[in-house]
Image: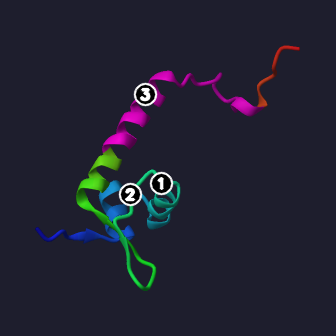
Amino acid sequence: MRHSYLTSADAARMLNLTPAAVRMAAVQKRLRVTAVTAGGVRLFTRDDVEAFARERAARRGSHERRARPGPRGVHRSTRQRPI
């Protein structure tokens, strides 16, 4: 069976990310690179990109449930902390 490979740009369009973000995910081993061309282009399978999308959605969902916003108009890093 012959696979059709996706470039970083193709994967980025599927994931609604930038190609640089896709390359970073590959460097960080969060997205599996199937092959690298002689010119250094990373290639991904559709299955791997779809699996990465599911993992991202699951992480985002769990993060949104845990995150608690700070007081309105006050950035978290500028809130006073108890002494």
Along the line of sight, which residue is nearer the eye, 76 or 1?
Answer: 1
> Disc 1 vs disc 3: which is toward the camera?
1
Identified at 64% across, 24% down, the residue is 70
What are the residue bounds of the magenta stretch? 54-77
Amino acid on which the number 1 mark rests in the picture: Lys
Q: Gap in Å between the C-alphas at discs 1 and 3?
A: 21 Å
Q: Does the residue at mark 2 contact the one at mark 1 (Cβ under 8 Å)?
A: yes
- Which comes sooner in the sequence, label 1 or label 3? 1
Amino acid on which the number 3 mark rests in the picture: Ser
Q: Describe the element under mark 2 as helix, strand or loop.
A: loop
Q: Describe the element under mark 1 as helix, strand or loop.
A: loop
Amino acid on which the number 2 mark rests in the picture: Arg
Q: Which labelled disc corresponds to residue 32?
A: 2
Residue designated by label 3: 62
Q: Gap in Å between the C-alphas at discs 2 and 1?
A: 6 Å
In the rendered view, tell whether residue 24 sits above or below residue 30. below
Residue designated by label 1: 29
Q: Does the residue at mark 2 contact the one at mark 3 (Cβ under 8 Å)?
A: no
Residue 17 falls in image quadrant: bottom left
- Which comes sooner in the sequence, label 2 or label 3? 2
From the top left corner, tell me how far across and down residue 42 is, in percent. Answer: 40, 71
In the rendered view, tell whether residue 50 sits above or below residue 56. below
Q: Gap in Å between the C-alphas at discs 2 and 3?
A: 23 Å
Q: Quadrant of the N terminus?
A: bottom left
From the top left corner, tell me how far across and down residue 83 is, in percent. Answer: 89, 14
In the rendered view, tell whether residue 18 sits above or below residue 50. below
